[in-house]
Amino acid sequence: MKRSKPLAILLIAALMILSLAACGGNGNNASNNGGNTPAPSTNESTGGDTSEPAESAEPVVLSFWSLGTTNYEELAKEYTKEHPNVTFKFQNTSDQTAHHNNLTTALSAGSGAPDIFMLEIAFIERFINNQDKFYNLYDLGAKDIESNYLDWKWKQATSLDGSFQLGLPTDIGPTVVYYRTDLIEQAGLPTDPDGFSAAIDTWDKFATVAKDFKAKTGKPFTDLTDLLYNGLRDQSPDQIYFSTEDGSFIGDTNPQVKKAYDFTVKGIQEGWVGNWTLWSPEWQKAINDGDFGVLLGPAWMAGTIRNGTDGSGKWQIAQLPEGAGNWGGSFLTLPKEGKHPKEAYEFISWLVSKENQLKSFKASGLFPSIPAVYTEPAFSEDKDDFFGGQVISEAYAKSAERVKPVYYGPLHDQTDAFFKNALKNVLEKKADPEKEWESAVKQAKTLVDRS
């Protein structure tokens, strides 16, 4: 499939659409929890005396637009100590939409883009369609480090023909099953992570356990339709709503999409799916109060769960049935306006190396995209008291290695909303599931025809 939409058209669309996707970290970013976001701040990160640069090295200042909570400014200071001719000018924000819209505007104008841009996965299709605005990292040596990273993560920033690499991987958001051990015990189920994972290791077993849980506790097994649907949807092989061959809509013929829809309808009809809204205060309260048994979410969702202090020690983490998915994560890209691509690439390849991904995980909760980190003793040394003493990094790592590459496409978010709204109508309005399915398919096809 060719990705070739003009940037100006994408700018108009981008300014009208808000994305729910959240970047990694520990879930404390405002984009993860719906909180207020600070205005971008600009400061100089030199990390050492730059008055005497290396004799043979020309002074270089790299501008870096970063996103969310990271330790990248501190790491940049370390880098400057070893490379005193290279200094950095950071602009950081937690507002994902403004962050990406600012780059779109700069690229459209032909001026104002940074040397290094941190690109969140939810916005990647907007920019990979405009490869001429970025350096191809394969031309700068990225082939040499490609095998270090999770295959599915690397491919998220690779052109469909495999010739262009837009960015180097930073963090990821592998999905897991967060569960309340007190409620699981009340339902007569095993409460240890391995035992509970085994009890729900197929979606059929998940549904059986869910129905029994509701009967024994009187509470919904899972919190809401959106996250349940995501759990199955993201296990679709290769593609979800759109073909990798020609970009055509395939959601109505993809069996995994129908399976995700029908399974969620089953949960609604059997009464074990809750009726909360993602990010609402009511949902946050339900998490804290233990009003449901499980929550299917990414690694960074732990930050949201921790906000409910009454649940401390009562939550643990199991694996999703039949596979895993990913929600969130970023890449480091080099816009072509940058005048120092060699120095910028050398820095970003250092920044997201094995050693520094481990540092970023320990300092900021950015879950590593290099699987070799998972075997480092420092990666799994901390038991988490909030999660019952579980080493939660190991649970996320297990999920990360189960994720398969999947193509989303530039119209994914809008299309996905059609199916989730259909499920909401089934839940709240008792609407006919098949009619709602047909309506969602029709809306998706109309969207594609108009795009």
Image (tube, grey):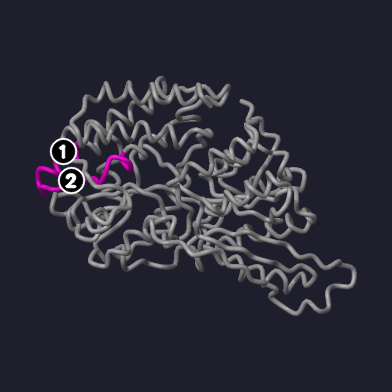
Whether 378 is drawn above or below 422: the answer is: below
Whole-angstrom CA distance, mark 2 to mark 1, is 7 Å
Residue 93, x across and y down, in percent: 54, 61
User: Is residue 378 at all visible to an observer of this figure?
Assistant: no
Please report whichever mark, 2 or 1, sits nearer to the chain's N-terminal start.
2
Report the quarter where the N terminus lies: top right
Amino acid type of the residue tagged 1 in the rendering: Gly
Residue in the picture at 39% in, 60% down: 35
Which is more toward the observer, 167 or 124? Answer: 124
Which is more toward the observer, 446 or 275? Answer: 446
Q: What residue span does the magenta drawing correspond to? A: 208-228
Residue 161, x across and y down, in percent: 66, 30
Q: Which mark, residue 271?
A: 1
Judging by the rendered image, the residue that carries numbered circle 2 is: 220
Which is more toward the observer, 282 or 372? Answer: 282
Residue in the picture at 38% in, 28% down: 257
Query: Disc 1 on helix, strand or loop?
Result: loop
Residue in the picture at 60% in, 52% down: 102
